[in-house]
Image (spheres, rainbow, N blue to C red):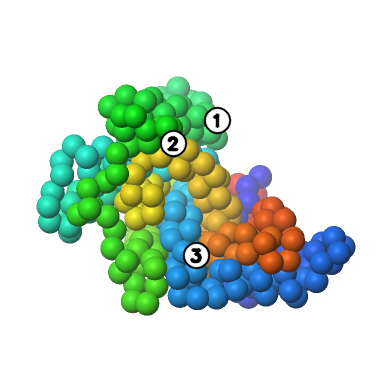
Amino acid sequence: MRFAIARDSLLPRIALAVALSLLCAAALIALSGHNPFTAFAAMLDGAAGSPHQFGVALNKSTPYLLAGSGVALCFRAGVINIGAEGQIAVGGAGAAATALAWPIDSPLPAILLALAGGAVAGSAWAAVAASIHLARHVHEVLVTLLLNFVAVLLVQQALAGPLGEFGAGFLQSPKMPAPVWLPRAIPGLDAHPGFILGVVLAAGLSFLLWRTRFGFSLRVAGASRPAALYAGFSVARITWGVMLLSGALAGLAGGIEVLGVQRRLIEGFSLGFGFKAVTVALLGALEPLAVVPAALFVGLLEAGSLSMQRQVGVPSSMVAVIEGLTMLFVLAATVRRRTA
């Protein structure tokens, strides 16, 4: 027995799921003694009340968009990749190590080289999971989940050693050279170009999924492994392909976070990103283009949560409740059971 995402009437289903989750959240806020309209207004003001705040929301959405698009592609192929958290961490370390080891004075080559280092590192870490899964027949959920903890520890060791800043009070790298900083490229917004890059890549992944032979093989494998084998597709090649691509996107997300927001590698910078990426992929019904509004929705919620808590007194943890309710409603509205 397998589950598949219904692609027909996708956007109306997602919009209805979001509306229902917000209604449930409003009821919970009202039960706690607060005005839900005031709470949502405060959240909206904190997320998009000014160009600067909206730019912050775009920056928060970027790692969810990039990693979530890769996770969605894996899930489409029936490969349950829960390792985006570790791939983001290793990608951030790879970008930081590249920027510090090969400083370049020209901004564009410096940025491209560092981001390539992050993507390669994330893809290499995903390759470790794929090789264990395929060679030793260990379930990919277990492999990718456990490798998250290994990745975090490896980054900690790197910051305690060659990547660490001497004399700092906690584990962090030296600040990245100025040429490698991501510019605030969106006019009028305090946002780096990562979100725009994520939208372009999501469009490319959607084309790959629905208009190429490789994408067709992913969809067949995700629907039925026996059918994929009967059609002559190699499940091992499909697994390698989606894992390497997903790891590269997650590593790129880590590199963008390090170069565009933190501007240094900090211990624990990726905590929560990978698991939120799984949520975003499910909210987007495993469609790369639908992951774009899903990531933006989560980014806006997180950007406005502190404002809601500060102005109204509603705990910022209510955002996690809204995210969870939205995911449940989206799954209920878009997933249908299918026999393999």
> In terms of image quadrants, where is residue 32?
bottom right
Q: Which residue is mark 2?
A: 267
Circle 3: residue type = Ala
Q: Would you place residue 274 above or below residue 124 in this image?
A: below
Residue under the point 18% across and 51% down:
110
State the residue position of label 3. Answer: 57
**Distance between mark 1 and mark 3 Cα atoms:** 32 Å
Q: Nearer the viewer, residue 285 or 8?
A: 285
Q: Is residue 320 visible?
A: yes
The location of residue 308, given as percent across then percent down, is 67, 64
For mark 3, give the secondary structure.
helix
Query: With respect to residue 264, does 185 lie above or below?
Result: below
Q: Quadrant of residue 44?
A: bottom right
Which residue is rendered at x = 41% and y = 43% of the image? 88
Residue nearest the observer in this picture, 335 or 29:
29
What's the distance in space between the residues labelled 3 and 2, CA to CA?
A: 22 Å
Give the residue displayed 54% in from the left and 73% down from the top.
48
CB within 8 Å, label 3 to label 2? no
Q: Residues within 10 Å of mark 1 (few under 14, many from 20)?
A: some
Q: Position of residue 306 (x, y in %)?
A: 62, 59
Residue lying at 82% horizontally and 62% vertically, measured from the top left: 28
Q: Nearer the viewer, mark 2 or mark 1?
A: 2
Q: Earlier in the sequence, mark 3 or mark 2?
A: 3
Q: First in sequence, mark 2 or 1: give its number.
A: 1
Look at the image and tell me in which quarter the N terminus lies.
top right
Task: Kindly check if marks 2 and 1 are in contact, taking CB atoms under 8 A apart as contact.
Answer: no
On the picture, is 184 further left or further right than 136?
Answer: left
In terms of secondary structure, where does tag 2 sit? loop
**Which residue matches tag 1?**
142
Q: Position of residue 241 (x, y in %)?
A: 35, 44
Q: Is residue 59 above or below residue 252?
A: below
- Whole-number angstrom distance, CA of label 2 to CA of label 1: 24 Å
